[in-house]
Amino acid sequence: MSEVDQNILSMEGISKTFPGVQALDDVSLSLKKGEILCLVGENGAGKSTLMKVLTGVDKPDSGRIILDGKEIQTKSPQHAQSLGISTVYQEVNLCTNLTVAENILLGREPQKMRRIDWTKMNALASDTLKRLLGVDIDVTKSLGSYTVAIQQMVAIARALYIESAKILILDEPTSSLDVNETEQLFKVMRKLKNEGVGIIFITHFIGQIYEISDRITVLRNGKLVGTYETSAITRVGLISKMIGRSLAEFDEMTKIKLESSKHIRSEALLQAKEFGLTGAIQPFNLDLHAGEVVGLAGLLGSGRTETASILFGSDKADTGSISMNGSVVQDYSPLSSIKRGVALCPEDRKAAGIVDDLSVRENIILAIQASKGWFKYLSLPEQYEIAEKYIKLLSIATPSADQPVKNLSGGNQQKVILARWLAINPQILILDEPTRGIDVGTKAEIQKLVLSFAEDGKACVFISSELEEVLRTSHRIVVLREREKVAEFSGEVDENTIIQAIAGSEA
Amino acid sequence: MKKPTKQTITWRRITENRLFFPIVALTLILLFDFIFIPGFFAIENREGNLHGSLIDIFRNGSTVMILAIGMTLVIATGGVDLSVGATMAIAASVAGILMNPSALKNEVFFVTDPNYTFQPLWLVIIAALAISLICGLWNGVLVAYMRIQPMVATLILMISGRGIAQLITNGLRVQITYKPYAFIGQGWVILPFSLYLVAIVFAITWFITRKTAIGMFIESVGINFRSSYFSGIDEKKIKLLVYTFCGFCAGIAGLVASSNIKTSDANNIGLTTELDAILAVVIGGTSMAGGRFSLLASMVGALVMQAITQSMYAIGVPAFALQAIKAVVVIFVILLYSDQVKGFVRKISAPKKEV
Ligand SMILES: Nc1ncnc2c1ncn2[C@@H]1O[C@H](COP(=O)(O)OP(=O)(O)OP(=O)(O)O)[C@@H](O)[C@H]1O
Ligand SMILES: [Mg+2]
């Protein structure tokens, strides 16, 4: 009996079906007071759906939810919140046109004489962000003007602000955060844990699972694989539980990379000279060679994304020039870049990536079709052929190519966007956080894909906030700091050298 | 792994089809007519041409149907065009003055010769359509290149358009007596001629949107214009195209309407039809926020609007009360499309689960 009493939450026998997909099949989970439980599994395993069932976004077909010993039925996220369940969803669902402060305090604005006390509200929001998460930004600016990572921090701050929370759900909050921010978040999580809050934490980062969690619940294909004490299961064991086989790929990577570096040619596919945009990135020089993967490393706000977007032309540089194949580029826009064979897989999947009501097929062929123009319409069989090819290549979990992309799990949406850019068969592929929210197994697949892509005489710019990943895939690493290119390393470098360059402590 | 039962899937397919709600609505109205209005379904054969209340719904609905085709594309990009009624009036004025320029001499001149026209018919039609195309282009430039919100941008022409139409006809109503012109709105080739126009515009639009990439681009821009921009879609050109096309459709509708009443009445032609066209599209299930569209569903939506009007007249509801009744229908439709009600319908229509 006392065993049960410890659980502040238990979900029993939860099943949930979507048309054509059994997302959850008889899944159970329990959470103790003051515990951090990691929920893990491949893309599309059902993690987010399980949390949405708990918070009343999705109605389960069957199963029970018991909170504090009482059976409950959550009707809506608001209802769940009033029961003490506070949530950060995988897809940040804040209002990008409101200010940061409004987003944090929406619905609980401090009042003065029955009016919103704006000064107090801004102070409160700014303080919450700074104190809890160490983020120091102007909270009166609109949320949309900040990067995905900051938006993620704001979403977390909003969830943390609920004082009476008994349970905190974090669905991949760290997917776009770098090491320092993740550390900051973990500090807050530990503090809440000590105060007795139960936390469910979803992540694809194995390291983070071991750093923070007490227990791990593993899902695979909508079914419960098991729940384990973190201290009692090895990493290798955990991964094989998640993907149903063992993973040797990461060890191979070093070899593959070494092999592929032989294919780098001295000719430059693209040369950027004193290229820059005021306020975004200081002028820099960069050559991309055929057969090469260039990693961009740096902290949040160091200018990685900005570098990517001026190279692609979605933002227009105001100094310097780019030349490709010897001639200077005149026209910077996504369309002309695509026609030149430059592709950018953008960081912000929701705002700049997916077109959510269109099908997986349409999303995949969108950029090819755009480069072909209005009238050279790909026939349906051609469209299906391309779509099916990438669904298979990237193992996108979807019942069919006609599924609206919004019904896919977060990681699978990411794969669809990646497919869109691989499909145009570019000369230069710029990947901004391509593995964001992607599971361990597929991550290795994508890294291999990037290397084999380069081997065909193309170049790739690889951006990731996960330094290990940058090291594993890149032949050359460019370090950015405070919107400036500060260093460049080629060949074998060790992680510490890069970390020092990133932090700027080599002096 | 348990798969959902076949039955639920097919039932869902039906209820989630875009045509489901508009067709149900149309059926309900026609059922009402069948019960309360004797002879509503009677179709008469006059010299090989078919006549009757049902045919009238189609004939009178043809202007809104043509407008709804252009409006569907505009709404699919996330915009709206309030100026189609005014554009109709402009097109009608241009056509009127070219056939009967008496108004320019500041006199209301009743031409009685049904064979008289100042300019040949082909020129009349081309000029009217060209002007309406320019009206659409103007809207498109404001929305796509000046980045003015669609509602505000098209409001400009909505308000000024009737003034422009008045200017063209020197502030007078122009009588149109030229017989061949009357054929556009009143002619009959087994079925009303205007229906063939609807069919042609529909077929061409369907072909252009579904057999080229344009339809997908329109939807993509309407759903997420940033993603579309990043994917290389020229969002501005797409918007320019749909507004221009919408103006063109309004021009055709203006010809039909003026031919119907044999005048180019700048004050009354197309008055409030922009709202009917917008409603037709909304009843057809295209979201005002943009995105997926169905031309066929918009056509059914236009028929729903017309069937309501006609039925109300038939049972003797006065014109002023009609607007109120339309409003009730609108509320009903908007409720039907809200997520809550959809979820509710799904719940009551799903077969009971075995426990
Ligand atoms: N609204 C929906 N309609 C149809 N299918 C859905 C819907 N939501 C989720 N699914 C499907 O349910 C399955 C589980 O999705 P879920 O989002 O829970 O995965 P996840 O474990 O969170 O994956 P990820 O790591 O990629 O975020 C997926 O196959 C997904 O396609
Ligand atoms: Mg998820």
Image (spheres, coloured by chain):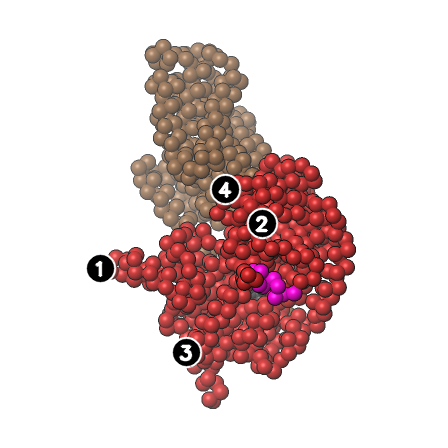
Q: Position of residue B276 (x, y in %)?
A: 41, 38
Q: Position of residue B102 (x, y in %)?
A: 38, 12
Q: Quadrant of ligand 1?
A: bottom right
> Range of the magenta residues?
A494-502
User: How far, Cα to Cα, is label 3 from label 4?
Assistant: 50 Å
Dot 4 and dot 2 residues touching (CB under 8 Å): no
Question: Where is mark 4, residue-wise?
Answer: B77
User: How far, Cα to Cα, is label 2 from label 3?
Assistant: 42 Å
Label 3 is placed on what type of residue? Answer: Glu
Question: Where is mark 3, residue-wise?
Answer: A195
Image hue for chain B: brown
**Mark closer to the observer (2, 3):** 2
Output the letter for the chain in red.
Answer: A
Please name whichever residue, A290 or B263, is drawn nearer the observer in this view of the structure: A290
**Mark closer to the observer (3, 4):** 3
Q: Position of residue B33 (x, y in %)?
A: 42, 43
